[in-house]
Image: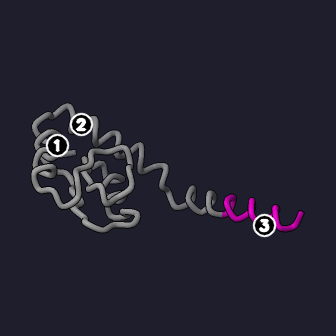
Amino acid sequence: MDTNQGFVLPSLYEGFPLVALEAMACGLPTIISTACPDLEIPQFEKGDTESLTNTILEVLLKVEKLRLLSEQCIRISVDYDWQKIIYRIIEFFKKFLYKENK
């Protein structure tokens, strides 16, 4: 991975950031706004350009931090594999179906 690359999602309004997960799965150090749910990666206050600037600089200026964030992003993205998500959804609905049948 080229440590000069990364991904920033500066959303003001965001549900679940699939595009951020795609970047994370590619190993890109990823930064998201607080409009996104906490994915255990660096976040900046949505709409606050100073917070965005400080967060980017904090990550970009430290090569070791970039490398660790890249590895962390890959680890986190694995939990959002579609097969795992489908399994979790099915298990979630099974709980309600079994409750109603009792």
Label number found at residue 67? 2
Q: Residues within 10 Å of mark 1 (few under 14, many from 20)?
A: some
What residue is pinned by disc 3?
A: 97
Region rendered in magenta: 90-102
Q: Indicate left or right for 64 with 77 as reference.
A: left
Q: Amino acid at mark 3?
A: Leu
Q: Which residue: 24% across, 60% down?
A: 9
What residue is pinned by disc 1?
A: 3
Work out how far the residue at label 2 is from the one at label 3, CA to CA, in angstroms: 44 Å
Does the magenta portion include 100?
yes
Q: Which residue: 69% across, 58% down?
A: 91
Q: Residues within 10 Å of mark 3 (few under 14, many from 20)?
A: few
Q: Indicate left or right for 24 with 78 as reference.
A: left
N-terminal of the pair, mark 2 or mark 3, is: 2
Report if the CB atoms under discs 1 and 2 are less than 8 Å apart: yes
Q: Amino acid at mark 1?
A: Thr
Q: Position of residue 31 (x, y in %)?
A: 24, 51
Q: Amino acid at mark 2?
A: Arg
Quadrant that contains the C terminus: bottom right
